[in-house]
Amino acid sequence: MESLYILINCDLGSEIEIIKELTKIPEIKEVRGTYGIYDVFVKVQADSSATLENIITNKIRRIPKVRSTVTLTPIISQGGR
């Protein structure tokens, strides 16, 4: 199982609307609104990196009012192994 974390910037005041849309995507395991530079934090899990790429490109980034995304790829799995 592959995991990624995504930081999202969105139009002012659209955070709740975007969070609702994100929760409809089955591969998204966690969504949180945040304060600071980014507006939304997302954890995504899928069977392959190709599937993750498809979710980011064709689902998340196409949600209306999403301005930009930053994808964080973990370098160490849980437990340090």
Image: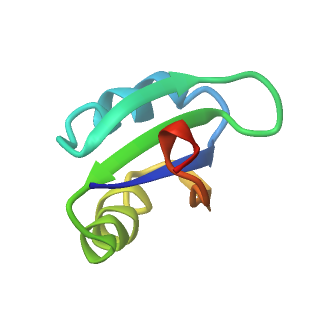
**Left of 17 or right of it: where is 71?**
right
Residue 80, picture quadrant: top right
| Nearest the eye: 8 or 29 | 29
Image spot of residue 81 (x, y percent) = 52, 51
From this view, report whether residue 9 is shown above or below residue 36: below
**Left of 7 or right of it: where is 42?**
left
Q: What residue do we see at 46% from left, 22% from top? A: 16
Task: Report the label total.
Answer: 0
Image spot of residue 59 (x, y percent) = 30, 59
| Nearest the eye: 31 or 20 | 31
View extreme (right): residue? 36
Image spot of residue 19 (x, y percent) = 41, 29
Q: What residue do we see at 38% from left, 52% from top? A: 63
Image spot of residue 37 (x, y percent) = 82, 38
Residue 67, picture quadrant: bottom right
- The colour scheme used to paint the residues is rainbow
Quadrant (top left, top right, bottom left, bottom right) of the N terminus: bottom left
| Nearest the eye: 58 or 52 | 52
From this view, report whether residue 42 is shown above or below residue 31: below
Q: What residue do we see at 59% from left, 54% from top? A: 76
View extreme (bottom): residue? 50
**Left of 20 or right of it: where is 32?**
right
